[in-house]
Amino acid sequence: MKEYAIGIDVGGTKLAAGMVNRKGEVIDFQKSATLTEQKPEFVIDAICQVYHALLEKTGIKPTEIEGVGLGFAGTVNGPAGLIYISSNLPEWHLMPLRDVVNENNFR
């Protein structure tokens, strides 16, 4: 088992991300604008940037991360990593968020 996990909340006005250890202690926290008026690729880039900012600031390597959880308001299929629709981000209809983010730098 790895020591750390990251949670990222994609909201209508902000991205909030935190890293915790196995004891549930917050190691670091980052926040940035969501850019809801932008196309999905800009928001995905912001998600990846906040992930990398946590790693860089803490010195934790991606290999030390057990998992990354993405929170997203809307109608979703969590196990499939699919967003059906979101009122906060209307261009996100049928977006395979988990797979797209994983392909774009969650390594």
Image (spheres, rainbow, N blue to C red):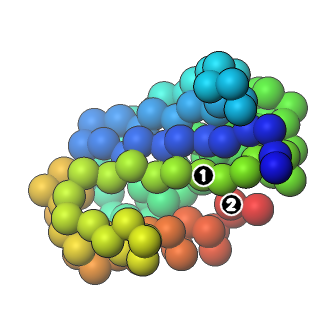
* Residue 106 sits above or below residue 14 on the image: below
Label 1: element kind: strand
- Disc 1 or 2, which lies upstream in sequence? 1
Q: Would you identify the image quadrant in which residue 42 lies?
A: bottom left
Q: Is residue 5 visible?
A: yes
Q: Would you identify the image quadrant in which residue 78 lies?
A: bottom left
Label 2: element kind: loop
Q: Would you identify the image quadrant in which residue 53 lies?
A: top right
* Residue 28 sits above or below residue 22 on the image: above
Report whether 7 appears left or right of 87.
Answer: right
Give coordinates of residue 85: x percent, y percent. Answer: 19, 69
Report whether 18 appears left or right of 15.
Answer: right
Q: Residue at 53% x, 75% y: name it.
A: 99
Q: Which residue is mark 1?
A: 68
Give coordinates of residue 51: x percent, y percent. Answer: 63, 45
Mark 2 belongs to which amino acid?
Answer: Phe
In this rendered view, identify the residue nearer to me: 72 or 44.
72
Label pair 1/2, CB-CB below 8 angstroms: yes
In this rendered view, identify the residue nearer to me: 11 or 37.
11
Mark 1 belongs to which amino acid?
Answer: Val
Spatial CA span between label 1 and label 2: 9 Å
Q: Residue at 69% x, 63% y: name it.
A: 105
Give coordinates of residue 76: x percent, y percent. Answer: 27, 67
In this rendered view, identify the residue nearer to me: 56 or 74.
74
Q: Which residue is mark 2?
A: 106
Q: Nearer the viewer, mark 1 or mark 2?
A: 1
